[in-house]
Image (cartoon, rainbow, N blue to C red):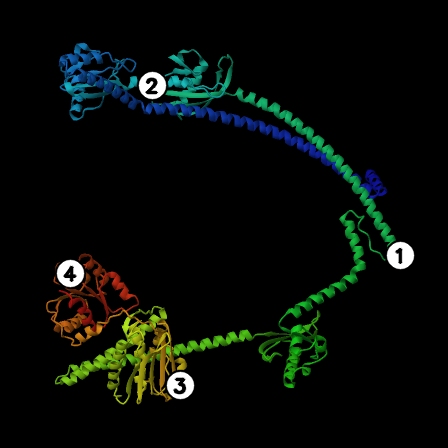
Amino acid sequence: MNLVKSFKNYLQRKSIADQLLYGIMAAAVISVLFIGHYWTSLETRRFKKQSEEIRDRFVNSRMDVVKDEVTRAIGFINYNRSLSEERMKSGLKQRVDEAWAIASNIYEENKATKSRSDIEKLIKDAIRPIRFSNDRGDIFIYTTNGVSVLLPRSRHRENIPSLDYRDQHGNYVVRNEVELLRQVDQGFIHYYAPGKDNAGDSVLLKSSYVRRFAPFNWYLGSKDYLEDFEKDMKDRILEYLSKIRYGNDGYLFVNTIDGEALITNGIKHLKPQIIYSSRDSNWIQVYKKQVDIYNTTGSGFIEYQFRRLLSEDFETKISYLGTVKEWGWIVGTGFYENEIESFIRENRKIMEVQIKTVIFHIVLSLLVVLIFIWLVSRWISRKFSQGFAIFNLHFRKAGLESIEMNQENLVFSEFRELAESVNAMTEELDSARKSLVKERSLLRSLIDSSPDFIFFKDLNSNFVGCNKAFADYLGIEERELIGRSDYDFFPKEIAEKYHQFDRRIIADRIPVRSEEWITFSDGSRRLMDTLKVLNSDSAGNPIGIVAISRDISEKEEIQQKYITAKEKAEEADRLKTAFLANMSHEIRTPMNSIIGFSNLLTEEDLTPEDKAEFIRHINHGSETLLSLIDDIIDIAKIEAGQLMVTFEPYNLREMMDELYHTHAELLKRKGKEQVNLVLESEQLPGGDVILTDPFRLKQVMTNLLVNAVKFTEKGSITYGYKVSGEFLHFFVRDTGIGISSEGIKVIFERFRQDNRYGIKHQGGTGLGLAISRHIVQLLGGDISVTSSPGEGALFSFLIPYNAYTAYTDISSEKRRGRDSTFAMDWSSKTILVVEDMESHYNYIRSALMRTGLNMVRVSNGQESIESCLNDHQIDVVLMDVNLPDMDGYTATRKIKAHRPGIPVIAQTAYNLPGEEKRSREAGCDAYISKPVKLKILLDVLGRFLDNKK
C-alpha cells in the first residue's frame, strides 16, 4: 500500500511529458522482451516441424521411387510374356521359310542339269545341319503322303510312312500336318507333347510350322516347346533386370515362390540359390514376409533388417514387392532408413546455423527498435512540452487582446484541433453570415433558372418576391413587384379570383391548383398549371404563400392529339360497320339477281327472249359480284403493300374504244339513253401503243366511268386523254350530281363516300376511288377531282408518257377471227382437264362442247401424270392448281420432265400477287384465274391448238 502511495507521489512530482516518456520506454522494453521470446519459440517449433516434414517427404519420395522401379520391371516382364508365343511362332516361321528358300534355290539351279535324286540329296545335305534356338530347333521334311524324308535327329526313321505315327497322347502328328497342307500351302499346328527334358507325365504346349515344297510334293517344317522358349526368355529378362541401377546404389532382387533366389543384391545367380538351404535365418525370415505378400495382396511394402552390401551390420530396410504369379516370381527393391537419418542430420546442421542467424537478427532488430522507440518517445515528450507552453502563452495573451492562435508550431493533431476550436469562437459570427449569403445566393440562382413562374406573397396577398421568369412575364423588375398586389397587374375580375384562392389557402391550409390560358408579351397563348401552397415557419405558423406556375401547353396538345386519334379510331370503327352493312347490300343485290333469275330459268314455257333476258341478268349479277371481289382483293393487296403493276406494250386507242362500247352498253342497260357518252382523244406523237399496265390502267378508267354513269341522269359523260408535256393526261367529266367540298376530302379514302344532304348513295363499297388512286401512284402519277354540288365532276390523272414504237399488234386480228365464239373446229384435238370439282368440270365441258374438242378428265395430280405419259394424243393440259393429293404445280413439273413440249395451262382461284410468276416457274405455259370467262379460255386454248399440227 505504501509502495503504491509512493509511486503516486512520484508521478505527481513529474510532468506529463516525463510520465509519457517513462511509460513509453517501459512498454517498449516489455514488448521487445515478449516479442523476442515469442519469435525465438516460433523459430524453434518451425525447425522441429521442418525436420519432421523433411523426414516424411524423403521417405515418401524414396517409397515412390522403389515402387516405380518395381512397377516398371513387372511391366517389362508381363510385356515380354505376352509376346512369347508370337515370338516363338515368328522364329519357327522364319527358320522354315529360310530352309524352304534354300531348297527352292537348289532346285531352280539344278533342275535342268541333274536328276531328281541328285537334287533331293543336295537339298537334304544342305538342310540337315541347320540348328537354332540354343540347338533345340531343326528342320524336318515329309512328303505330302506322310513319308518321312529328312529327320536330322532320327535318320533311322527316314523314308518310313508316318501317317499313323501318334504321340503319347494319341495325336496323329504327321496326319494333322498333311491334312493342313491339303487346305493351305503353309500354316501352324498347336498340340501337346512331352517335354524334351522332362520324362514325367506333365504335358507342355508345342507349336509346329509347315510349308509345302511343290516340286517334290514335300513339306518342310519345324517345332518348338513353349516352356523351352520361355526358359530362354526368362534368362534374358533376369540378365536385363540384374543390370538395372537407380539412385546411388539401388538395385532389384528376384525370388521365386519355390524358395529360389534368382537375383540377389542386383546380381543374377548362374544357378538359382535355395533360400531355405542358405542357413541365413534373417534372409529366411525376410523371404517369409515376401511370401505373405505374394499370397495376400500381391504387392506392397515390408520393413525388415538386412545387411547392406559390403557391410556386416544389419540396418533397417524398406522394400516394395511385386509379383508375377504366372512364373511364381517375387520382384522387389528397397532403401535403408539410415539414408534418411544422414540426410536429416545434414539438413539439421544447416537449419541450426540458420536458426542461430535468425535469433541473432531478432535480437539485433529488437535492440534497434528499442533505441528507435527511445528516440521517438523523447521527441514526443519534448513536443508535448512545447505545445503546452504555446497554449499557456496564448491564454495569457488572450485576456489582453483578441488574436488568432498560430498553429504552425503545433505538431500533434489534438493540439491543432484545440487551436481551431479557439479560433472558431472568434470567427463564428462571420462564418454564419457568409453561410447565409451563400445559401440565399444558391436559392436565388435555382429559382431564377427555373422556366416556371415562382412568386411569394405575405398573408395579405401582397408580393414579397418572385423569380426572373415571373418578372419578365409582368415586364417589371422584382423590386418593383414587392409590396404590390394582383390588383396592380391584372384586371379586377382576375385579381379577385386570385385573392379568393389566397384566402382559401390561408383558411383551409390546403393547396389550390388551377389551369388557365394566359397571353404573353409576344402575343402567344400558353396554358399554365398553377399550384399555390401555404408557407410556414419552423414552428408551423403560416407566414405567406408560395406559388409555382408551369407551362403545360405541350401536354395539352398531346391530350388533344390523343382525343383526335380516338375520334378517328371511333370513326374508322363506324366506317367499318357501315362498310360491312354496305358490303352485305352489295353482295346480296347481285346474288338476288343470280339466284332469282336462275330459279326462273327452271320454269316451263319460257320464250327464247325471256331466257336470253334472264341469262343477261345472271351474267350481269355475276360480273358485278366478281368486280366486288376484285375490289376487296385489291384493297387487301394495297394494305399489305403487294399490289404491283406490270408494264407491257398496249394499244391505247383500242382500250378507249373497248371502254366506249362497254359503257355505252351500260348506259343502255340502266335506261340512261338520254346521257351522251363522248370520247375525246388526240393523236399521240409516238403512235397509239404505249408502255403501261393495261389491266390496271383500264381498271382506273372503268372505276371513273362506272361512277360517272352511276351519278349522271342527264347531259353527257366525256372521257379521253391528251399529251401534256412528258405525261399523258386522262380525264372523265360528267354532268351528274357533283361532289361537295367535304366529300372531295374523303372520297379517295377507303369505305368513304359523299353522303351530303341526306341523299342515299347509288350503291358501291367506297373502295373504287381508293384503289384507283393507289394504282395511279404506282403508274407514276396522281389523281385529282374538281366538282361542285349539282354541276358534275371532273376526275383527271397524269401518268408518264412512254411511247413504244417497236410494237406490232396482231391481237385485234386474232380477236376479230374469234368473235364468233364457236367458229373454230378442234375436233382433231384432245385436251386433258385436271379438275376435282364436278361443277367446274361440267362448266368446262359444256363451254367447249361445240368446238368439237375431245376431252379427257382426271381428278388428281397423279392421274394427270399417268395420262400424259400413257396417252400421246393429248395436245394440251388444263391444270387446276388446288388438287387433293398433290398441287397442280408439282404435277406440272413431273409432266414437263417427261413431255417438255406439251402445253400446260394453269387455272387457279387464288388470284394472289406473284401467282402467275409462280406458275411460270413451275413450267406452265399460260395462266387463267377463276371464274374462267369463256372468251379468255378460248383465246388461251387457241394460242396452242390453232398452230398445232
Q: Is residue 933 left or right of residue 276?
A: left
Is disc 3 placed on a helix, strand or loop? loop
The quarter of the image holding the N terminus is: top right
Residue extending farthest to the top is 156
- Sequence order check, earlier mark of 1 and 4: 1
- Sequence order check, earlier mark of 3 and 4: 3
Whether residues under marks 1 and 2 lie with C-beta atoms below 8 angstroms apart, the answer is no
Q: Amino acid at mark 1?
A: Leu
Q: Which mark is residue 740?
A: 3
- Sequence order check, earlier mark of 4 and 2: 2
Q: Amino acid at mark 3?
A: Ser
Q: How far apart in space, not on screen, are marks 4 and 2 (Cα)? A: 84 Å
Q: How far apart in space, not on screen, are marks 2 and 3 (Cα)? A: 122 Å
Q: How far apart in space, not on screen, are marks 1 and 3 (Cα)? A: 104 Å
Q: Nearer the viewer, residue 431 or 105?
A: 105
Q: Which residue is mark 2?
A: 233
